[in-house]
Image: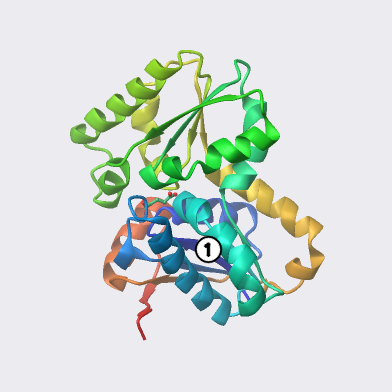
């Protein structure tokens, strides 16, 4: 098996994998969730880099020719270092991609007011990655970011559909819209947030377009694979999926269907060994 590796700090990347599997079902996929050490969103650069690198190393050892960091926090804080400093040593033929670049490449096409809002973890907001990348592709865009530190724990604890979640959703939507009244495009820049979509829409004016990354990243992956035959040709294509978690396999198996929309059978991975 030479699958596409899909990595997230926990469950969030499963929302991205869902879209990969729906649109590109022919490939084999190997998912790794670092649940034992999630959330990443509040951790330092050094820690997110160290954890992500360890997971990428493991995925490379499983013969993944291509790895997608389906996590904004890891894409913001670890991707560049891994691409520039580690990949050459670990496996120069393999590729590691993130979710921020494909999103920022197209996001400006959605706005007519040139005002875009980004909802993300504290780590992603503080990294400045969205500002830097959007500036490259759409310098005319005015960007407003809002960190929503409670949203990942709400989703991870299956509280995202409860009345309690409304308080935190309403608060952050009101905050970001009060900082720029012209926002007409709002990005869910955390792979956990699509689970809160229904609640977010409840507090969002109808003229604001809500974007989540699964579809965007899938289009970008498809395009990448069409352009890179040397990578595409090495990926195994039997439609197999395998799921690993650094925490309890039983917990992962129980919760994953909320994110993935179908039952999975997870295997525990001890990265300390
Ligand atoms: N899913 C991760 C992201 O997209 C965040 C979850 C976490 O904080 O670990 O940023």
Q: What residue is drawn where x is 35% and y is 72%?
A: 246
> As rendered, which of 182 and 216 lies closer to the eye?
182
Location of the C terminus by quadrant is bottom left
Across and down, in percent, residue 138 comes to: 67, 30
Q: What residue is drawn where x is 38% and y is 43%?
A: 121
Visible in this render: residue 106? no
Across and down, in percent, residue 70 comes to: 51, 55
Q: What residue is drawn where x is 67% and y is 54%?
A: 221
> As rendered, which of 50 and 268 lies closer to the eye?
50
Q: Is residue 36 above or below residue 151?
A: below
Tell whether 70 sits left or right of 160: right
Location of the N terminus by quadrant is bottom right
Across and down, in percent, residue 145 comes to: 44, 31
Tell whether 159 sits left or right of 193: left
- Mark 1: secondary structure: strand
Q: Residue furthest left?
A: 164
Q: Residue furthest bottom?
A: 273
Q: Residue under circle 1?
A: 6
Q: What residue is drawn where x is 37% and y is 59%?
A: 10
């Amino acid at each position: 098996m030479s699958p596409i590796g899909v990595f997230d700090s926990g469950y969030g990347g499963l929302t991205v994998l869902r879209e990969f599997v729906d649109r590109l079902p022919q490939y084999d996929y190997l998912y790794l969730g670092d649940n034992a050490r999630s959330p990443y969103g509040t951790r330092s650069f050094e820690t997110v880099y160290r954890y992500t690198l360890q997971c990428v190393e493991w995925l490379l050892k499983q013969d993944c020719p291509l790895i997608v960091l389906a996590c904004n926090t890891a894409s913001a804080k670890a991707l560049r270092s891994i691409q520039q400093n580690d990949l050459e040593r670990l496996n120069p033929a393999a590729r590691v991609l993130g979710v921020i670049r494909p999103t920022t490449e197209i996001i400006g096409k959605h706005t007519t007011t040139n005002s875009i809002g980004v909802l993300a973890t504290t780590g992603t907001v503080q990294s400045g990655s969205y500002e830097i990348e959007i500036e490259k592709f759409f310098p005319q865009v005015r960007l407003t970011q809002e960190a929503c530190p409670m949203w990942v724990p709400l989703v991870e604890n299956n509280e995202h559909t409860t009345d309690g979640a409304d308080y935190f959703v309403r608060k952050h939507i009101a905050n970001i819209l009060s900082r720029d009244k012209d926002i007409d495009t709002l990005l869910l820049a955390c792979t956990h947030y699509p689970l809160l979509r229904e609640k977010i829409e409840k507090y969002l004016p109808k003229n604001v377009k809500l974007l989540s990354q699964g579809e965007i990243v899938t289009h970008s992956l498809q395009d990448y694979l069409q352009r890179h035959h040397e990578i595409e040709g090495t990926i195994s294509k039997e439609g197999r999926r395998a799921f690993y978690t650094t925490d309890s396999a039983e917990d992962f198996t129980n919760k994953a269907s909320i994110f993935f929309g179908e039952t999975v059978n997870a295997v525990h991975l001890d990265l300390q060994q």
